[in-house]
Image: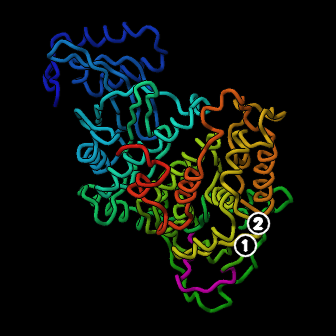
Amino acid sequence: MEAVLKCPCDEQHPQQAKDFHGNLEQNSKLSAGVKKDIEKLYEAVPQLVNVFKIKEKIGEGTFSSVYLATAQLQTGYEEKMALKHLIPTSHPLRIAAELQCLTVAGGQDNVMGVKYCFRKNDHVVIVMPYLEHESFLDILNSLSFEEVREYMFNLFKALRRIHHFGIVHRDVKPSNFLYNRQLKKYALVDFGLAQGTPDTKIELLKAAHSEDQQEDSVHHSVQRSVFGERNFNVYSSTYQENSSTKLIKQSKVIDVSSRKLVTKKKIISTKTVSSGAARKAVSACPLNLPCDCYATDRVCSVCLSRRQQVAPRAGTPGFRAPEVLTKCPTQTTAIDMWSAGIIFLSLLSGRYPFFKASDDLTALAQIMTVRGSRETIQAARTFGKSVVCTQVVPTQNLRTLCEKLRGTNSSCKGFQGEGPSRSENNTALSVASDKPCAPETLGKQIQHLQSFQEGDGALETKATDMKGWDQVPDEAYDLLDKLLDLNPATRITAKEALLHPFFKDIRL
């Protein structure tokens, strides 16, 4: 530790109650809700009162909340720190694994480190250095091309660092890669979803992986969706067959028992049902039961009754790689590189988020509109997946796509779209509906993308203030193409990306 805290964190201070209320009174500008959250945190982990003055709440997610605080050091100086309060329901092994990632890989090469950790019963607070940073969306279209180049270079440095230790971050996105534009400082944060490669140097990630596999093997649903979408191709009293819901071609109605392959019914205990509600007994289909829907654009009830395939799906929608969307069981550090490619795509096009879908199947369709349907199908075969697409969608030229979306293409310069403003719609591909992807949906994706390419909604770029965007080299799009390689086995690595000609004059 470079500095020592002034107050001991493991002793009760006589002025604790007074300091507690004093800290809250000083934060008069905070909302009532935030004040209540800070008060609960002080009560849950009372050691914090002796050490930190919590100033405000600066972030909140599914598994944690982050606060800005100041710590009084023995040197007399105050230091800003970020306090990450993990929700009490987090698995202890998962918390320990996140801490080990921070302590082993953090503290250098743009990877956030850890300074202290406090625990009281089931409440855990991780203390990290605070990096003041800008919102990605706020600065996206004011960044110069050179700033984008530096941003991506530093992101690859962080990914090279964690991948060296066999850490798969799984949630690489702008909000997890902090950027201080003025100081040119960067920090990759949030290892709450991290997983280990087979040769990971983080021992607790190995243990966490084994724990996850055991849980997945116990908890599975019989009637299930394929890609996270609602089952519109299985009859339900809730969703009647009408023109508004009949999006996917109905599978044949097959009497499974007529095949004489199911000899007896296996009763599934209601204890294994995640909802805990009593359900009717259902028949479980053998794994080798044949069906008639393979390689077709439908999913039959036989397939839906099979045990759900176990595959990691953690991550943020819009940043998941094709192998994640198709539930490939073997996922590597390549999924982080895909996510980095999506960030680069947003930076080059000026659109964020670039992809926005309500389920995995629609997300895969959106990827097809950029990378091509045949290319996606061919890549899926390399990792054992069969993808069927009812339309042939050509691959897009990445330079043409990005330049037209940003408005730097010669046919779009000075164009002011009459469509939605950037504040209303800054997404290149999005679906308002939460229905599963059908041919009609894929067609809408293509039309939506084409409307942007033709100028509708293109960003206005002044010729006098191009900031280098009129001179983007081919190397930039070559790197983007390698990052968005649909085949994870041939996708560029972080180490290789740093040596790419795009960064030829930047020192490691």
Residue 140 quadrant: top right
Q: Earlier in the sequence, mark 2 or mark 1?
A: 2
Residue 297, which numbered label? 1
Residue 248, which numbered label? 2
Q: Is residue 367 left or right of residue 200?
A: right
Q: Secondary structure at mark 2?
A: loop
> Magenta span covers which residues?
281-294
Residue 58, x across and y down, in percent: 44, 26
Q: Main secondary structure of the magenta part?
A: loop
Residue 319, x across and y down, in percent: 55, 50
Nearer to me, 231 or 468: 468
Residue 2, x across and y down, in percent: 17, 28
Amino acid marked by disc 1: Asp
Nearer to me, 203 or 503: 503
For marks 2 and 1, give the CA distance.
Answer: 8 Å
Spot the residue most to the bottom.
260
